[in-house]
Amino acid sequence: MNEMEARTLEIARKKLETGASGERIHRPRLGTGGDFADVFFWDTAFTVMWAKYYPDRLPVHTSLDNLYRLQGEHGLINRQYLPTGEPKWSSEHPISVAPPVLSWAELDLYRLTSDSARLERVYAPLVRHHEYIAATLRGDDGLYWSDALGCGMDNLPRWHRDWCDICDGLRLEAHHIAGETHGIHENPAMRWNRHGRWVDLSAQMAYDAWCLAEITAATGSQDQQKWRAEHSELGRLVNELMWNDELGFYVDLGYGRQVQRLHVGGFWPLIARIVPADRADRIAAHLEDAATFGTQMPVATLARNDPDFDPAGGYWRGASWAPTTYMVLRGLAAAGLEELAARLAGRAYATVAEVYRETGTIWENYAPLAPAPGRPGQPDFCGWSGLYTVAIPREFM
């Protein structure tokens, strides 16, 4: 174990929430980044994806099981829970739904442990959550819509720049939020939801169906054909409606039209295994194209030629984030593009190591064009940034 990995583990262990287990939340559980006491859905899943290499030192299974324990009666596992176990966000608004990545996390654990009994135990809550999203966030065209915070990429601009005054979707009201609101319900971006079709959630649901099919194959369930069919149908829709041949990339839709803005969500079809072979190389080429995603620190969350790209990171307006970078690397490997994945992984790791030498810690996100923390960004983010220092070197270098 090198110094940077040891530091990652040290930070993660300091951030463990300890103390007595409650009826709804069991401890110790993994912290998910900064100084947060809340339980976050996709943060927990991505933290597990590197913590899986330390099952004897970190409470991997307990942290995931808390989410199943907190699942609502209609199947929703909320995007965020308060330390009491109360949902932070009302299910009346799509902000309550996080990217469905728990099946991916569980499948990764199974591949390390061969624990089919655990897969059998978690299969039902995974299915209920998947079916909740399908019932609430799927449009009449078969694609999915979400929310600026619900998608996890908080301030990513994913509508045409002249549409801000007509973002007339479901409003986020103060009563949809438990605890502090910080005025977030007044943000116009919180009204961009049901009129869009989100390439990331549409591909994530296809990938979730693929993972559920793999889980059924491992456990002998009779549902495998159903999930394969759903995966295939979603793949057909994404390729038919969200592919832009001129750009060589997958894009969102808004009001029935393609939104020609390139962001990291357009790489999700790769890991979802729905990209035709003749398109994979075109998508991957963007990762070394200085006009779009060819940045010093892979992978920028917003293309460099977008007017809202921020060279300092700008949170999700250009910064490199561990979960999305890891997703891209896994997607490249799934598409047979291992050499490119290795090059990008090496560059990301080297940049994180350079920043570590300067600052002594691991950061929430990183600037895309220089070896520096993203601005804004929190230190000691282990948390999912352990993907950079643990999972990425193990799996790609």
Image (spheres, helix red, strand yellow):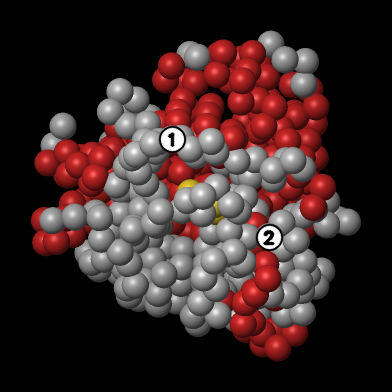
- Front of the two marks 1 and 2: 1
At x 39%, y 36%, the residue is 20
Mark sitting earlier along the chain (1/2) = 1
- Say which element carries label 1: loop
Please tell me how crowded label 1 is: few (under 14), some (14-19), or many (20+) other residues with Cα within 10 Å.
few
Q: Nearer the viewer, residue 265 or 241?
A: 265
Q: Residue furthest right?
A: 140
User: What kind of element bears circle 2?
Assistant: loop
Residue in view at x 72 percent, y 63 percent: 93
- State the count of labels: 2
Q: Nearer the viewer, residue 84 or 186?
A: 84
Q: Residues within 10 Å of mark 2 (few under 14, many from 20)?
A: some
Disc 1 residue type (three-letter): Ser
- Identify residue for label 2: 90
Q: Give residue 101's position: percent from left, percent from top.
A: 57, 41
Q: Position of residue 8 (x, y in %)?
A: 23, 44
Could you say where residue 65 lies in the image, as x and y percent from the top left?
A: 52, 32
Give above or below for 191 relative to 340.
below
Asked whether, in this view, residue 121 is left or right of residue 142, the answer is left
- Residue shown at 14%/61% (left/top)? 359
The amino acid at mark 2 is Ser
156 is higher (above) or lower (below) than 60: below
In the image, which disc is placed on residue 55? none
User: Disc 1 designates what residue?
Assistant: 21
The alpha-carbon separation of the residues under discs 1 and 2 comes to 25 Å
- x, y percentage for residue 51? 35, 34
